[in-house]
Amino acid sequence: MTEAASVGADGTLGTDLPPSWAVTTLGTVTDYGKTVKVEPAEIPADAWVLELEDIEKDSSRILQRLTQSQRQSLSTKNRFDVGDVLYGKLRPYLNKVVIADTPGFCTTEIVPVHAGPALERRYLFHWLKHPAFLKYVEATSHGMNMPRLGTDAGRAAPMVLAPRPEQTRIADQLDTLLARIQACQDRLEAIPALLKRFRQAVLGAATSGSLTADWRKDRETPAWVPTSIGDLLDGKPRNGYSPKSVEYETSVRSLTLSATTSGRFLSQHTKFIPESIPADSHLWLEPGDILIQRANTLEYVGVSAIFDGPPQSFIYPDLMMKCRPNNRVDGRFLYFLLSAESTRRYFRDHATGTAGNMPKINQQTVMSAPVNLPPMDEQVEIVRRANRLLHALSQLEQRHTAAAAFTRRLTPLTLAKAFRGELVPQDPSDEPASELLARIVAQRDAPTDTTSAPPPRRGRPPRALKETATMTKSRQDDDVMGQPYLAGHLRRFGSPASAEALFKVAELPVADFYKQLAWEVDQGHVKDNQTSLEPGHAAG
């Protein structure tokens, strides 16, 4: 398919591509699905072995880089080379795509895709992360729990093709813009931890006396009294009730744990209960009731929240306990005491349960938690001051949420703009994508010369060559960096040569050799025929 089209941020293909562009399929312009399988015994101990869990979703950052000796993998792997685009086909919605910077071996759930000289590998990389491609693989992947993109479906995936020089211009601009977006997202991701620390600092100051130290200077106020949470409650905490919920609407709604996990009451986290609850039941919540999570992960066990919903509108589950303040304590200040880090630490230290069970605290643990109690007038002042700070914190959280949501939209919007031809200007002198596409198809369909022995496999030269080859050159040399250095050697060969043969005469270290080769292929100085190399069309 080569008709004009456009690509929207929502993953749709329209009809507004530049006239010099074309729409084709991934299998037409790449070798998608053609892999070289390698058994564990054939993998060198120092070789990079990449698994899907090593790649961060969406950002495509490599989280860890392990060798075969470290990983001790026992499964068949796919071989990949420098510059291959590595596409995670298992659960493709995780958006795991990387460009290999060194040779290695990967799980068969990762497909190495060789771009070839007709495609800028970074252009291909960005297309595989485009909303249109993601929408396609979501629709065509098979498997309910662990969906994966099939090989045939991958080859049939849509591919928007720009002229070859424009691909590089687009990739350069995307690299710059997406790096800035990612840096912005990384900074935003650090903010919740800072806001959490600020919140704990406010609660710590409120419950230690430092928040009202200046207020006490000009007053003769009684000292703070050591006490326990149990002395501040109107009766004992009471556990909730968790009957089986139903999907249809009933007259009784019960909170779920997530209704209070944030430390604030969120009324949208409820479920319907098919039972009648007496009007005088302790399960009905009243404004000002404090709910404590008596069972959760260790991070959240003991989290408290003040119920501020309508009276007798909700009941609460068995994994929570409810308490009410007595006349010795302001209800909001009691909530501060329960939420302070010192009290939360006490709950964690006294939680019970094995590693396989959810940590729990009981009524006695809550009641025995030690606290210090100021006089009532100071409690009121503390609540006033703390509420002002916590309100400012809430506003910051809302702004952060809005900013994070906005930046999440920036990457797909930028990719959509790039693949509509709107990110960089078109150059009329560029060869149209239709001609590039015709040449790709012609090269793919050309008969293979079988009169000579097949060249060695493409990939990392054997260890013996590294030890015996004379490496007198460096990529920093003037006649190498930015020059068609390898293309010159290929011209002297007079016929296509393998990567191994070219490596022997290049006199470059392996890392420099592959970097130089990748650059010369991108620039058109060297033509990569998958199994052999020859001089390209670019002038040398």
Image (cartoon, rainbow, N blue to C red):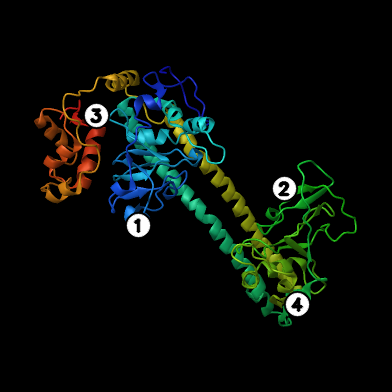
Secondary structure of the residue carrying tag 4 is loop
Residue that carries the numbered disc 1 in the rendered image: 70
Residue drawn at 23 percent across, 23 percent down: 448
Q: Earlier in the sequence, mark 1 or mark 2?
A: 1
Please, what is the three-letter code of the amino acid marked with disc 2? Gln
Query: Do the residues under discs 1 and 2 have CB atoms within 8 angstroms?
Result: no
Quarter of the image containing the C terminus? top left
In the image, 214 versus 473, the foreground residue is 473
Please, what is the three-letter code of the amino acid marked with disc 1? Gln
Indicate the quadrant where residue 112 lies.
top left
Residue drawn at 9 percent across, 31 percent down: 492
Secondary structure of the residue carrying tag 3 is loop
Q: Nearer the observer, disc 1 or disc 2?
A: 1
Residue that carries the numbered disc 3 in the rendered image: 529
Query: Do the residues under discs 1 and 3 have CB atoms within 8 angstroms?
Result: no
Q: Earlier in the sequence, mark 2 or mark 3?
A: 2
Residue that carries the numbered disc 2 in the rendered image: 268
Alpha carbons under labels 2 and 3: distance apart: 59 Å
- Pinpoint residue 223: horizontal percent, then vertical percent: 71, 82
Alpha carbons under labels 4 and 3: distance apart: 83 Å
Q: Give above or below for 213 relative to 165.
A: below
Q: Which mark is residue 375?
A: 4
Alpha carbons under labels 2 and 4: distance apart: 36 Å
Q: Earlier in the sequence, mark 1 or mark 4?
A: 1
Give the class, few, some or many, for how many residues have Cα within 10 Å of label 2's Cα (few <14, many ≥20): few
Secondary structure of the residue carrying tag 1 is helix
Q: Is residue 148 visible?
A: yes
Q: Nearer the observer, disc 1 or disc 4?
A: 1
